[in-house]
Image (cartoon, rainbow, N blue to C red):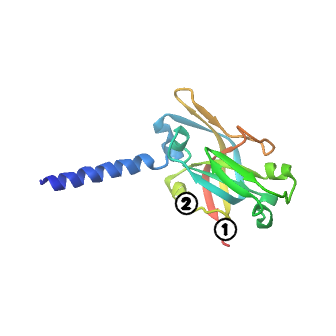
Amino acid sequence: MSLRVWALIVLAGYFGWREFLRAPVSAELAAHKGYTITELEPYTETLRVLSTESYSLGRESDLSPIDIAAGWGPMADPSIYKQFQISQSGRWYYWQTDHFPIPRREVETHSSNIHIVPATPAIAKALEKVKPDELIDVDGSLIEVRANDGWHWKSSLSREDTGAGACELLLLKKISIEER
């Protein structure tokens, strides 16, 4: 074999391996990486996607390749949520507004950052298609994840909390995007 053929084989192997490492780990594969997933309570909801953020670095991205900032109730109403500037960074969801169209507490209790753990590779692929402003139907469970070395990550179980620890950690088993 020529040097050129060997170089192509090595490059193909390198890029294939790199893509494998970047691929989200589905819940069904999590145990092979030393994680235990415990379902805490069912979670079924219709949500407005306010923003999405993908992650590929950090331990959490092994399980959750995407966060969705989501709204429900009044925060799913375009005439309300479009009055907010929404962003995500570092696994946090941020919002700001010059004028509150609804009380601040309603914003806090009707929107959240949701760390999504896809249950299967097909769910992981479906997540790649989710865009801001879409209504999505999600079905799964709020979860706690533990690793063999003592690391853990646990979902909030309340709609009333804010700040650190208030995000949902969702094992997503089913998702559908509603037609516009």
- In the picture shown, does residue 171 fall above or below 47? above
Q: Position of residue 121 (x, y in %)?
A: 49, 53
Amino acid bearing label 1: Glu
* Front-most of residues 131 and 138: 131
| Other-residue count near label 2 (Cα within 10 Å), few / some / many at <14 / 14–19 / ≥20 | some
- Evaluate whether residue 10 shows in this view: yes
Question: Measuring 81% from the left and 57% from the top, which residue is drawn there?
Answer: 98
- In the picture, the disc for residue 9 is none
- In the picture shown, does residue 160 fall above or below 86? above
Q: Which residue is mark 2?
A: 126
Quarter of the rendering occupied by the C terminus: bottom right
The image quadrant that residue 158 belongs to is top right
Q: Position of residue 65 (x, y in %)?
A: 54, 49
Q: Position of residue 42 (x, y in %)?
A: 70, 47
- Evaluate whether residue 45 shows in this view: no
Toward the right, the furthest residue is 103
Q: Which residue is mark 1?
A: 178
Question: Measuring 68% from the left and 45% from the top, which residue is drawn there?
Answer: 168
Amino acid bearing label 2: Ala
* Front-most of residues 154 and 87: 87
Toward the front, the furthest residue is 98
Left or right: 52 as drawn, with respect to 106 = left
Question: Measuring 65% from the left and 62% from the top, which residue is drawn there?
Answer: 132
Q: Position of residue 79 (x, y in %)?
A: 80, 67
Left or right: 171 as drawn, with respect to 76 = left
The image quadrant that residue 178 belongs to is bottom right
- Identify the secondary structure beneath mark 2: helix
Mark 2 and mark 1 in contact (Cβ < 8 Å)? no
